[in-house]
Image (spheres, rainbow, N blue to C red):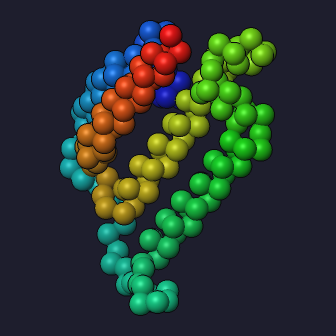
């Protein structure tokens, strides 16, 4: 729900202009505002899913893992397979790939682009929630636990923006 609200209030307006850097900056600002709101409502002190000490068990080849780590590996594999199947075997997945490739052509082909974008936001929000749970189980839950991912995010957005500009220049 929060992903849909953010898209409606912020990103739908920025999407019209097609500037990846502006969208990354907006997402950075939105994340800072949401983090501050969560810190204000709840607390800035770290929380834990479990404080129990877990003993790593041998799983083979000299590798040891805790029960939480094994659960997270299975959960991650299930989510990866589910996303793969969604993208390759469903109508919404094919529509998402079409819209990502060429939104104007997808619209002309009869795909409801706004519906696909809403579905993408719902799926992305659910995956972000799952990744937060995975990270929280692995370490701890704190308001700024995803902050380490921002620098790679900016680098990726810049690379995408540069690639899009090069592609536009080639088409001219």
Image coords of residue 71 (percent x, y): 52, 69
Does residue 54 lie above or below 13 as drawn?
A: below
The answer to which of 164 and 150 lies nearer the viewer is: 164
Image coords of residue 48 (percent x, y): 32, 60
The answer to which of 119 and 102 lies nearer the viewer is: 102
The answer to which of 38 and 159 lies nearer the viewer is: 159
Q: How many marks?
A: 0
- Asked if residue 91 shows in the view, the reply is yes
Does residue 20 lie above or below 47 as drawn?
A: above
Image coords of residue 88 (percent x, y): 72, 44
**Relative side of 53 to 110, left or right:** left
The answer to which of 162 and 24 lies nearer the viewer is: 162
Q: Which residue shows up at 48% across the image and 28% down it?
A: 2
Residue farthest toward the left in the current orientation of the protein: 45
**Relative side of 130 to 135, left or right:** right
Q: Which residue shows up at 41% across the image and 90% down it?
A: 62
Image coords of residue 120 (percent x, y): 59, 31
- Asked if residue 31 shows in the view, the reply is no
Q: In which quadrant of the rendered view does residue 90 lie?
A: top right
**Relative side of 54 to 145, left or right:** right
Q: In which quadrant of the rendered view does residue 119 lie?
A: top right
Q: In which quadrant of the rendered view does residue 28 lie?
A: top left
Q: Which residue shows up at 54% across the image and 41% down it?
A: 126
Q: Which residue shows up at 73% across the image and 34% down it?
A: 94
């Amino acid at each position: 729900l929060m992903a849909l609200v953010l898209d409606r209030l912020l990103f739908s307006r920025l999407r019209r202009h097609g500037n990846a850097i502006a969208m990354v900056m907006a997402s950075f600002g939105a994340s800072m505002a949401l983090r501050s709101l969560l810190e204000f409502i709840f607390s800035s002190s770290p929380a834990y899913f479990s404080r129990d000490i877990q003993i790593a068990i041998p799983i083979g080849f000299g590798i040891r893992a805790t029960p939480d780590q094994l659960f997270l590996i299975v959960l991650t594999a299930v989510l990866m397979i589910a996303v793969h199947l969604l993208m390759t075997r469903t109508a919404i997945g094919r529509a998402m790939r079409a819209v990502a490739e060429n939104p104007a052509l997808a619209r002309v082909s009869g795909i409801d682009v706004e519906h696909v974008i809403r579905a993408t936001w719902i799926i992305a929000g659910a995956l972000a929630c799952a990744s937060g749970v995975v990270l929280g189980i692995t370490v701890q839950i704190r308001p700024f636990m995803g902050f380490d991912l921002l620098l790679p995010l900016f680098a990726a957005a810049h690379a995408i923006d540069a690639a899009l500009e090069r592609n536009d220049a080639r088409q001219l």
